[in-house]
Image (cartoon, coloured by chain):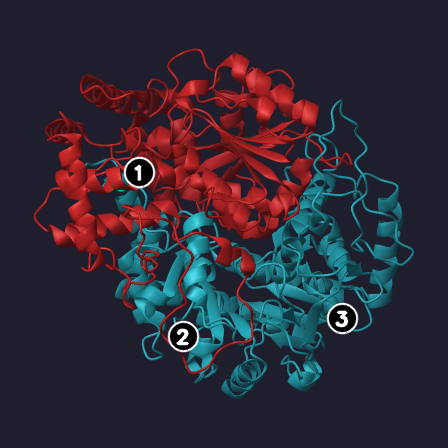
Chain colours: A red, B cyan
Amino acid sequence: MSLTAAIQSVSALVSSAKSSSFLGQGVGPETRFTSFSMPLLPSRKLSVCKCVSAAPPTEQTAHKTKVARNANMAKLQAGYLFPEIARRRSAHISKYPDAKVISLGIGDTTEPIPEVITSAMALRAKELSTFEGYSGYGAEQGEKKLRAAIASTYYKDVGIEENDIFVSDGAKCDISRLQLLFGANVKIAVQDPSYPAYVDSSVIMGQTGLYQKDVEKFGNIEYMRCTPDNGFFPDLSNVSETDVIYFCSPNNPTGSAASRDQLTKLVNFARANGSIIVYDSAYSMYISDDSPRSIFEIPGAKEVAIETSSFSKFAGFTGVRLGWTVVPKELVFSDGFPVARDFNRIVCTCFNGASNIAQAGGLACLSEEGLKAMNNVVNFYKENTQIIVNTFSSMGFNVYGGQNAPYVWVHFPGRSSWDVFAEILEKTHLVTTPGSGFGPGGEGFVRVSAFGHRENVLEACRRLKQLYQ
Amino acid sequence: MSLTAAIQSVSALVSSAKSSSFLGQGVGPETRFTSFSMPLLPSRKLSVCKCVSAAPPTEQTAHKTKVARNANMAKLQAGYLFPEIARRRSAHISKYPDAKVISLGIGDTTEPIPEVITSAMALRAKELSTFEGYSGYGAEQGEKKLRAAIASTYYKDVGIEENDIFVSDGAKCDISRLQLLFGANVKIAVQDPSYPAYVDSSVIMGQTGLYQKDVEKFGNIEYMRCTPDNGFFPDLSNVSETDVIYFCSPNNPTGSAASRDQLTKLVNFARANGSIIVYDSAYSMYISDDSPRSIFEIPGAKEVAIETSSFSKFAGFTGVRLGWTVVPKELVFSDGFPVARDFNRIVCTCFNGASNIAQAGGLACLSEEGLKAMNNVVNFYKENTQIIVNTFSSMGFNVYGGQNAPYVWVHFPGRSSWDVFAEILEKTHLVTTPGSGFGPGGEGFVRVSAFGHRENVLEACRRLKQLYQ
């Protein structure tokens, strides 16, 4: 099928969807809160989902409180990206109940967790039924042994110590706690495109202006454009001074890992401007080349950077929930007050530690056997990545990422990401992620995740070849 | 030992502590972040811990960022209460390494989790190693089955449905997410005394003014005094209009449960003023009399209340981490926008669901066998409560709480709570919780928790009798 024919098909689809239940699926009162959804206003352009402001609710209730809605919440655009995709997937399944839908979409892990890890969790669970093995509240910062193991496994040669590490229930949750830490009066910078939790949590915290529809950006956020032209590393000479720079490497969604030189530039930029880098290394184990695994490999980073990471993509812990954040004791605010001391207060006040069972799993991950097992899982997904890269490359697409990350970033020049998303879903029953969901810099791209069973990835590639070859 | 002699002893202790390492324990750089600690300024009064502003850090580092410290964080007083108590416990153990310290302090559960529950968690952990049993990201709102089980177990007759329930990693974490939901521009009311997370998270969110040392209160918070004189239910005719009313029943720390009449007054007050009640029912299973188990038993509550609860104290899940928050679809902001819709967006953006293993445990808790087992655990702690109540009563103390809660609230009229805390720790190696840590209304009280092995509770009571009889 040619591209032109495909565009015509999706055009027809979108037209019919406007008057059918396709887009409205899940908006009824019964399913309203199962996944967030919002009535979509019709758009004049061929675009399945242009983000739109929330329409007022249609139902009236007997009593209204006098509490004003938080104006920052009202600034947010439509739903958070991934639940929105889950909603569209559900809608598609309702439309095609017999289709075998394959998700290479939300970055969810699919492979079983190695037994050395689940055995440790099962054992810990069982021990909770014994007097000797029972434990109640743990330290909010995480168990000492696990903090020590994270420090020695991932930060051995860079001077990060056990008490610099705060164990959490995942990087996404910690990003939100970091926003609480910084408060409303900071300006942030993000890679564009980037993982949407940075921007959305910043909006919720009140750090931003309104959404500017014309540029598809929030006011008071610095969007650092990352494109094939600049090797997905922003031109820092164009970046204004900001307080907090969110930087993810290997990057979600572009799959690109910053080199040592690039990260050195970033650290020097932060030092010169007095900024704090929040470095997201949730995909560091996917690095194949000599790109740094941690921002703390760069000299001087400890005085300007926080690092957040996760067991989710290393060990399949997306559902188990375990991550960590490093706040070095050397990092201080402008008045000299240690950032870690305030973060510790946030963790103690707004969190109660990760599940003790998940922490037992984390400790098993970092045993010799566990590390080997995690590497096997990571390598399996990386083989998937190669299959996906080869598929798109063989069809003449420009493909980025993949080498150091479980994400493949495919260019569809001149097309809307949501259109391509809808086309692929409608024609092949494959769920991907529209690049523009990660920021305006992602427009024209689609992210294909390598998380999937092998046979599903192969089948997905066959279907993609049928559609695009 | 007489009270006078005891006061003289603790007076001597405090004098020596000021010039010894007792108070400084844990303040060195090595342990600084293991538990939050802050140099304590000497106080003119006989008081081991008057909360004081943070002193500037003593260490200087080579590079300071230009990011200003969040002014709201600087408003907070000393450490969060419970880590501070943990720190003092550690300091005491260092001072008396051979003492058998018993904690009736931070409300941490001690009894093993029933096997029916841990078996389900172990099974779920093991299943994560199989292709069929593996699951990655779950719904941010919690697994459908668990939401349904919570609704049918705790809210069957009050019209709360599965999709009104958001499963979480605990009530404390949800309180913080509720603060994010409401934002900086609301005024809150709290029971005084109350669980410190309400006030502290409000301060962090920027809802309050500065701490007013003379009255020991933050500006722009309405403290609703709860004393023996008003039966621990506030005189609402004295309470000014506020946006959000935090109300915990059975109460932590006073152990008092509000009656149906009292809660009806509270709901009517909220309806009349347009307020939203955040009702904390984390101890509802400890109710013995006919006090409501949920705010939603009160007619009209669904349009004015959110309820947060937890498996922590029902099933010993303080370390496992599982709770929930009910946001009824009937609850709307002043513009008619459903509160649940914004809370859903917060949960999707700032959280990624509770651990799937913990959720399997929660589901087992709500099975017939699990409910029986939880009731046994609760009843065990309630027997402890009775032992503690009887001990203090027999010595002539005025004792409150206990009947409907795992907390006993003991009056030491005219004395500082922190002094009594220190006296009990020093003389009996027992950890309690100073009432003033819960707000100025707690001054002169000490909270004794009933969470403990039976032999420890009995031993604690023997020691208390030696000290106070």
The spot of residue A141 in percent (x, y) is: 56, 40
Where disc 2 sits, the SS reads: loop
Which amino acid, by three-letter code, is at mark 1?
Answer: Ser
| Res. A311 in view | no
Q: In which quadrant will I find the N terminus of chain B?
A: bottom right
The spot of residue A63 in percent (x, y) is: 46, 81
The residue lying furthest to the left in this view is A98
Q: In this orientation, which residue lies closer to the viewer: A249 or B351?
A: A249
User: Going by the image, does B17 lie left or right of A92?
Assistant: right
Q: Residues within 10 Å of mark 3 (few under 14, many from 20)?
A: some
Q: Quadrant of residue B191?
A: bottom right
Marker disc for residue B330 = 2
Which amino acid, by three-letter code, is at mark 2?
Answer: Glu
Identify the residue at horizontal 58%, vertical 26% (top origin).
Answer: A238
The residue lying furthest to the bottom in this view is B261
**Nearest to viewer (mark 2 / mark 1):** 1
Dot 1 and dot 3 residues touching (CB under 8 Å): no
Q: Are marks 3 and 2 on the same chain?
A: yes
Q: Are marks 1 and 3 on the same chain?
A: no
Inter-mark Cα distance, 2 to 1: 38 Å
Q: Which residue is mark 3?
A: B412
Q: Is residue A409 above or below residue B115?
A: above
Q: In this orientation, which residue lies closer to the viewer: A314 or B250?
A: A314
Q: In this orientation, which residue lies closer to the viewer: A189 or B405?
A: A189
The residue lying furthest to the front in this view is A44
The spot of residue B253 in percent (x, y) is: 62, 67
Q: Residues within 10 Å of mark 1 (few under 14, many from 20)?
A: many
Q: Which residue is mark 1?
A: A416
Q: In which quadrant will I find the C terminus of chain B?
A: bottom right
